[in-house]
Amino acid sequence: MSGALFDRVALIGIGLIGSSLARVLRRDSKNTVIVACARTAKTLEAVRRLNLADETTDDPAAAAAGADLVVIATPLSAYAEIGRKIAPALRPGAIVTDVGSVKGVVIRELAPLLPAQVHFVPGHPVAGTEHSGPEAGFAEMFQDRWCILTPPPGTAPEAVQKVRAMWEMAGMRVVTMEAEHHDKVLAVTSHLPHLIAYTIVGTATELGEDLQSEVVAYSAGGFRDFTRIAASDPVMWRDIFLTNREAVLELLQRFSEDLTALQRAIRFSEGDWLHDVFVEARATRRGIIEAGQDTPAADFGRHGALPHASGAPARDET
Amino acid sequence: MSGALFDRVALIGIGLIGSSLARVLRRDSKNTVIVACARTAKTLEAVRRLNLADETTDDPAAAAAGADLVVIATPLSAYAEIGRKIAPALRPGAIVTDVGSVKGVVIRELAPLLPAQVHFVPGHPVAGTEHSGPEAGFAEMFQDRWCILTPPPGTAPEAVQKVRAMWEMAGMRVVTMEAEHHDKVLAVTSHLPHLIAYTIVGTATELGEDLQSEVVAYSAGGFRDFTRIAASDPVMWRDIFLTNREAVLELLQRFSEDLTALQRAIRFSEGDWLHDVFVEARATRRGIIEAGQDTPAADFGRHGALPHASGAPARDET
């Protein structure tokens, strides 16, 4: 035993999240052996070049063999195949966790594939940037962010505690909740906003060529924030919408109704009503600031040490 | 004559934009006399405390008297009344400009009120933050941003040139275009995004109390970007939507159609189609980065010297 939280960690998928976790382990748990698994030779070559792992492989089973922690950090659509491949290789007592943005589907589709003597602790570190791949990761990405664990009823508390301790080592605030509840909350805070960002960027690009080039040129408005959101990994987002379909569709319906109400108010020049809606939105913003989710303390980005940070300035041009 | 670009500048309205311009003049045009006009004693007191003007008044006519440049920097709904008040006080040859986010309405409603010997150069410095009031301004806000001037046909070129020179002094890239075209471009880059941000924040706050508090707590996702946009001045935005109604409504219709298409694709699990849409959105993002609207050079915010900068980090948690 090395005295580390985990002696041997298998990272199945080593993109933005997986590689950031590797960097945390390199920084804070030097005795942990890291095995990185990726599909492509290019990714594995990058992992070796960046010294993010002690061993690399394209075989999930080989990665999982002998690991006391397996972290699945691929798009959700790859989970079932990975589950089938690693199941026979997992040693009794091993912990399997993941970092997926939707949790109900993981419990429904991955958990049944795992052997009974393995602990399954689904997790969602709510952290990231719009960039992808092992080069884009950095250890500080998790700092002061939330990590939501959704262990199914009956999960061994020691296993949950060990996964919690790892994310706390990464600087995260860890909470547990039911998977279904997680999926509803994230549909609001993340999935619907991204869907809308994709839509508005799409709408803009469908405008006539002339207008489009000017839209790009003068995009120093709200539009820029949307494009940043919409630059995230397309595969990851496809999988999120397909796996959290019910919650997203219900919310989308509410959103459409609200937007139609605003549209009508503009059409009929109902200024007072518009004003009230905007005042209320501002109050919600204040609630978020008071909840401490947007403080300079949480904003490592402005220290400028991170070349990948696109550095969206806090400017909101009209 | 002081040798300054303008000897006497009247700022009618001295909130975020007006006070930032005052700071630019203080910094770069020390011989210019600045007269600030605001409705409330509280704002005028702040202006004096911050030394943003040489004279203060709540009477637009008094402010405009003798000025060689009058800058209207109030919400759009105040323009007509201000136009009527300043018209008799303007000296021949004076230049009147503004900073409003919609330009067609300004030319339709303000221009006819002004005397023939006055030059009218409508303008839109596309810069700002989600904060309001004279305390929120700062001279660097305009740096490297676009300023769009929409002089009506027949405007004296010398007058346009002087307004252009002022915004260039503020660090802006100045272009001219037709007012109607401006309003279409800004409907895409700014007005629709803000309307959607207001809607999504409203939709979220209408959720049940329990979910709502969690949405606020875990808002470190795309939702946070939306709330920042939605925190902008409610009066200003009400006026923008009412005055750029046609362009906004047409665009909103297109957006709703596109959103409905995505909704349908999610409902019927059309993963390939979703993926294609997301890939295209990412390409638009790249176009914007290449157009230089999101470079670190334009990001003064991260230098951390500005206490009002909320410093939204370039993190886009899923």
Image (spheres, coloured by chain):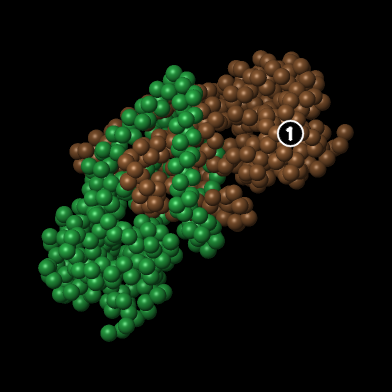
Chain colours: A green, B brown
Label 1: chain letter: B
Point out residue B208 in the picture as x, y percentages from the top left corner: 32, 41
Point out residue B204 in the picture as x, y percentages from the top left corner: 36, 40
Q: Quadrant of the C terminus of chain A?
A: top right
Q: Residue B148 vs residue A276: left or right?
A: right
Residue drawn 59% across and 26% down? B76
Give whichever of A58, B40 is nearer the camera: B40
| Amino acid residing under circle 1 | Ala
Residue drawn 76% across and 16% down? B88
Q: Is A238 placed above or below B57 here?
A: below
Q: Is A224 placed above or below A65 here?
A: above
Give whichever of A250, A13 is nearer the camera: A250
Res. A303 visible in picture: yes
Q: Residue A86 vs residue B78: left or right?
A: left
Q: Quadrant of the N terminus of chain A?
A: bottom left
Q: Residues within 10 Å of mark 1 (few under 14, many from 20)?
A: many
Q: Is B172 placed above or below A41 here?
A: above
What residue does disc 1 label?
Answer: B36
Give whichever of B293, B49 is nearer the camera: B49
Task: Name the image quarter holding residue B207.
Answer: top left
